[in-house]
Amino acid sequence: MHIQRPTFQRPEPPAPNGAPTRLAITLGDPNGIGPEVVLKSLHDPSLMPSMTPVLIGSAHVLRVHADVLGFSDLDIHIVDEVPEEVPHGDVAVLDVAEDPEPPVMFGSITAEGGRLAMRAVERAVEACQACTVDAMVTAPISKDAVRQGGYDVPGHTEFLADKTNSPQPTMMMVAGGLRVGLVTSHTALSEVPSAVTEEAILEKLRVIDASLRDDFAIEQPKIAVFGLNPHAGEAGAFGQEEEEVIAPALRAARQEGFRVEGPMAADGFFGTQLDADHDAALAMYHDQGLVPFKALAFDHGVNYTAGLPIVRTSPDHGTAYGIAGKGMALPGSMRNAMELAVAIARHRHQQATPAT
């Protein structure tokens, strides 16, 4: 059987395995914990041999957060373009702030913070498309601040899809072998049933299957697919979507050659640890997939956007305004996002490089 896979034009493959992977790392909302977890991650010496980080945001914001953390040894090297190399021990910052000293108001939602965060994301996408970096890692943004700043987007995923002309971006949460994708992401719960269609499910399965093969080097992925209703509809007792929409989508997926199982009850899947028997799970809506994922992996999970021509990862948490500026943020999720971006960029390079 022929597996139908998404098609899009990718940038040139990244640097060979022996060279450090070039990462564009956006600082996120200046009033949240983004700059803090970036700085803490970069203080991990085990990360540096595998990557060359270029931070995108504001050098002033970075200094404010560094002062809070007591990182007095921070040597910031401001650049106008992504450099070929970054001097050892320096932190390269591509400064995109309109104001040389943008305000930092820990824990506050501001239009200035939203604009700065999104300017950084825009610049990181441009760097990926120009192949001056191999992947991008985004620190958390505030959707409210972004809206106040004049950006009419639900979140990173949709913004990146628009900038890269990607029709089927798929949010995939990753923590080791636990991977959870979504049919609908930032969609109101009342609108989810109408958005869960046969074609939507099938398209997400195509994207996830291709990503598991190309980005995670899994040769024959096995994907679990959840139902929409409690107990996966209980044979129609709690809803008809499983019988009328999801099951037909899975039959079509099997005809295309995908290894899929379902519709499955989400609570039973996680409760009985069936994730160990599957390479990924496809949830129908945001909280169905993300609530159990974050319960299991909140301090180390990664948000990966499958279905893009560029590589983008992010920590699985938000701006955490309540602890911003207190030095309390745990960097594990951001550190893992950097490591995963490096790994996926290298898998893609291996896929694109002919065997010799």
Image: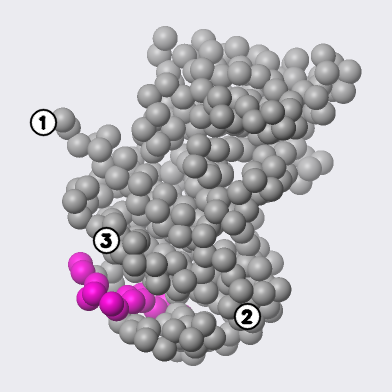
Left of 181 or right of it: where is 21? Answer: left
Q: Label 3: how many residues lie within 10 Å, few (<14), some (14-19) or many (20+)?
A: few
**Secondary element at image label 3:** helix
- Which residue is at 59% across, 56% downward? 299
User: Looking at the picture, how far across and down is residue 249, in whole percent?
Assistant: 62, 18
**Secondary element at image label 2:** loop
Left of 321 or right of it: where is 136? Answer: left
| Res 143 quadrant in image | bottom right
- Find disc 3 in the rendering and name its residue: 49
- Which residue is at 51% across, 69% downward? 37
Left of 118 or right of it: where is 111? Answer: right
**Secondary element at image label 1:** loop
Of the image marks 3 and 1, the number of the one nearer the N terminus: 3
User: Looking at the picture, how far across and down is residue 228, in whole percent?
Assistant: 75, 29
Residue 298 appears anywhere in the view:
yes
Of the image marks 2 and 3, the number of the one nearer the N terminus: 3
Q: Can you say which quadrant of the picture contains the C terminus?
A: top left
- Asked if the residue at tag 3 contacts the one at tag 2, i.e. Cβ–Cβ closer than 8 Å, the answer is no
Task: Tell me the amino acid under the disc marked 3.
Answer: Pro
Of the image marks 1 and 2, the number of the one nearer the N terminus: 2
**Of discs 3 and 1, which sits in the foreground?**
3
- Find disc 1 in the rendering and name its residue: 356
**Of discs 1 and 2, which sits in the foreground?**
2
Q: Is residue 205 above or below residue 43?
A: above
Measure the C-alpha gap from mark 3 to mark 1. 26 Å
The residues colored magenta run 84-97
- Which residue is at 42% across, 49% downward? 340
Left of 56 or right of it: where is 139? Answer: right
- Find disc 2 in the rendering and name its residue: 326
User: Looking at the picture, how far across and down is residue 66, in whole percent?
Assistant: 47, 83
